[in-house]
Structure formats: C-alpha cells, structure tokens
Amino acid sequence: MPKLRIKQKSTTFNVNSNVLGEKNSGFRFYTQQILALLKKRLLIFSRRYLIFIFTLILPVFVLALLTSVVPSTSKIISETLDSVFGRDHIQPYTLDTSNYGEQNLIFEIDGTNYNNALENFKKFYKDKNKIKIINSKDYGKSVDNFVYQKRKEDSNNLISNYFFGIEINSDSNHFVGYYSSLIFHSAATILNEMNSLLLGFLTNNMKRSIMTVNAPVSTGKSSALPSNFSYNQLDVFSCLEIIPFSFIDYIFGIIVAFIISVSTIHLTREKRNGSKSLQLLSGTHYITYWLSNFLFDFFVFSFQIVSMLTALKIVAINLTDKANDSFLITKDWSSIMYLFVFMLLSSFTWSGLAYLWSNFFKSDIVGFVVLFLVLSFATLVDMICVLLQFFDASSDQPGTLGDVSNTIRIILIIFCPNIAVKRAVFNIKLQSNNICIGLLSLLFKNRENQKTNIRFVFYGRKLHTYVHNPFKNILSQLSK
C-alpha cells in the first residue's frame, strides 16, 4: 500500500520586509476602524432578532395601527357632545344675537347722517334686553381695536363675550359685520342681524326684521351641537395640545421615546460585558468608537423616520374622514418634508441622550424601561402643563400657575427630545386652523405680540371682505 508523504515547507518571515504592506495611519487608519466597527455593529444588530424587530418594525406598525383607528378631533367633540347632551338637542335654531346670553355688541357709525343712523340703531336694540350696545367712538377706537383690547385685558372674553360687532356708513348704508370664529353659527347670525338692520334703515321702520331658522341635519360629524352655544365651547379645547384632542402628536411623542430608549440597549450591554473596554484597549480610538455608534444610529433613525412618515401617508390616503389629523398632517408634501427634516435633525439629540443614559445602568433592560417610562411621563406632563396654562390664562388674574407651567415645559423640551417632535407634529396640525393659532397667540405670553394676526383671526373677520367673499355682492346690492 503506497504511503502518503507530506512535505513540509518552512517559511521565514522578515519583520523588516514590506510583504504585508505598510500599516495605515492618520485618516485612513481611523476610517478603517470606523468601517470595521460599523460592520461589527450591523452584524450584532441583525443577529439580535428581538431588538431588530423592536427597532425597525414595531414603531412603524404601532404608528400605522393607532393613527388608523384614532378618530378626528371634530368626531371626538361630536361624540362627546352626543354622550352629554344626546341627539334630542338637534332642533331648529333661530339665528339671533340674543341666543348667546348677555352680550356687548360693539358698533361704529360714520357718515354725515350720523345722528339719524344712531337713533335708528338704538331703536332696533331697544327691546333686546340681553344685548348691550357700545359705541366704540366713545372710547376713541375702532370696533376691532376695542374688542382686541378687552380680550387682552381678560381672556375670558374669547369664549364668553364680545362675539359680534357692526360698522355702518350712514351715507351709503354699507354694513360691515364682525364675528367670533369660536362661536357656533356666528357668521350666519351676524349676517341675519345686518340684513334686519338694513331692512329697517331702508324702510325707516326699525320694528321690521328678517328671521332665519336653521334646522340642522344629522351628518355624523358634528351633529350633536345643541341650541345653546355655550355647550359648544368644547371646540376651544381642540386647539390645545392635550388628550383626547391631540392623540396623534402624543403617539409620536411615545414612539420617539421608545426609539430613543431602545438605542441605549447596545451601549449598555457592551459596557456590561466588557466589549467596550476591550475595543479601547486594542487600539480603537475613543472618538472613533463613539463616531461609529453615532453614524450607525443615525442610519437606523433615518430609516425609522422614513418608514414612519411613509406609513402615516399610506394611512391618510385610505382614510375616509378628511378631518382626521393624519390626513391634515400629510396632505401637503411640504409638511411631510418639514417633519422629515425636523425629525432627522432632532435625531442627533436622540443619540446624545441615549449615550448619556447608558452610563447610569448596568442592566440594559432596566435602562431601556426606565428611560422609556421617564420620556413617556414627560410627554404626559407637557400636555398637563398646556392645560394648566390655558386655565391660568383664562382666569381673572393669570400669573404664577402659567409661569410655572411654562418653565416646566421649557425644561422638558431641553432634556426630552421626543417632546420637540410631539410639538412639531402639533404645530403642523395647527396650520390648517387659523382659529387655533389666534387662540394660542392671545392666551400664551410668548405670542402676545402678534397683535395683527390675533385681531384678524378672532374678531377682525369682515364678513364680506376677508372670509365669505360670496356675501360681498349680496351686501353691496342690498346697500344700494
């Protein structure tokens, strides 16, 4: 039987030779380390299936699921009113300023026929005991300036007084009506009021009037609005960043809190098992180590952000309720791009908080759970502070409570990056609602200087000029 012979070949290696090439140094050396660390991180990430699912799939799935079932703000208000007042309150409604309780109606009369117009105006409101007419000229102000000043002095006037105003040119019988956008049927009511006044002026008989009756039809969207306007003040709360009227931004805040918390697991585990120390001892520069982790997390965050916004857009496309917050946020590509860029820039702070937090816990699971609970609780506290600010601003003497709440919100947004994302989503939603922008501008001090916008949104809505252009021709014809 033949024997198998193995011939051994001796190899000598000269340490001074260049067979293996020169050792990398400088920028190439650090680049090589970063690429190796990124590859290592990717392999570890892909092999930990649970973390992989939690990081890339779960946030997108939860966002798509919750946003698809969360009703629109208007539907929440409608269902709330239905449960409190019932469908029996849907009844014919006569449009008249007296329906709104005791009110101060501000008026201004110009023209050479001032005295006669003023006398007729007073005759018209003589028998309307609930309406107190105030001539803004007595205070040297225009109608909208007078009301703006009153609402600045007491924010309760936003939802309890000064709902209507009228300007009259006695020479041309030209009428301009002002109304509060917060009040149910306010536009139609002031239009009916001006029609009655105009009829009285033209016929020189102020006892004549026009009656308009609205018979609401149940539509399922806002069908439970009762005849008493004060019940409808619940609409005001839809402008505030509070639950249950701001579910979608709260959902974003919780999901981003989850994403930040999950990103702490890898670093905490490397610190616990000694992998971090071993890499640093083997020649890995500490800047290289942290930069590689930062780049990897940035890529993961970018993928998550794109996936979340894509899922939100898909959900919005399939929604039948176009008043849903998901649809309002994603209806314009500019809004989607704004949110994408904002979240992408915000992700830098996500990594910073996660890396800092990983130093405080030896257990990766404990660190993840505690951080998630802290950020989630901070999201809820931020919304509670908004509600406290609103009640403080609506009180007779706003002060300490609002200041404390505002300070807490500033602290929260500095230390909790998920709250910044939550507020960004809420601000995008506000773009489609001028009423809410005006309300927040007037109530909260950091926007108090936006005088022009506040007056325009809340009281300076001239019926035939700014909002309801179709009425312009009607009023012009009536005034001839």
Image (spheres, grey):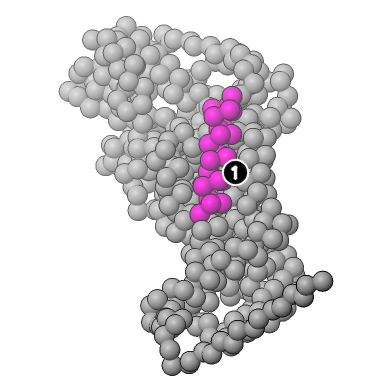
Q: Quadrant of the image for the N terminus?
A: bottom right
Residue visible at 35% across and 37% down? 456
Q: Give the x, y percent position of residue 276.
A: 62, 80
Does residue 107 sit above or below 173 in this rendering?
Answer: below
User: Looking at the image, which residue sits at the far right?
Assistant: 1
- The residue under label 1 is 248
* Magenta stretch prevailing secondary structure: helix
Task: Note whether residue 6 is visible.
Answer: yes
Residue visible at 66% across and 76% down? 270
Quadrant housing residue 278: bottom right
Q: Of the residues shown, which amino acid type is indicated by label 1?
A: Ile
Left or right of residue 40: residue 480: left
Q: Give the x, y percent position of residue 154.
A: 47, 49
Q: Give the x, y percent position of residue 342.
A: 45, 54
Give the magenta-colored segment's residue range. Answer: 302-324
Residue visible at 43% across and 42% down? 335
Q: Is residue 160 magenta?
A: no
Left or right of residue 329: residue 117: left
Residue visible at 54% across and 29% down? 317
Kind of element beneath mark 1: helix
Left or right of residue 203: residue 218: right
Task: Note whether residue 437 is visible.
Answer: no
Does residue 119 sit above or below 64 in this rendering?
Answer: above
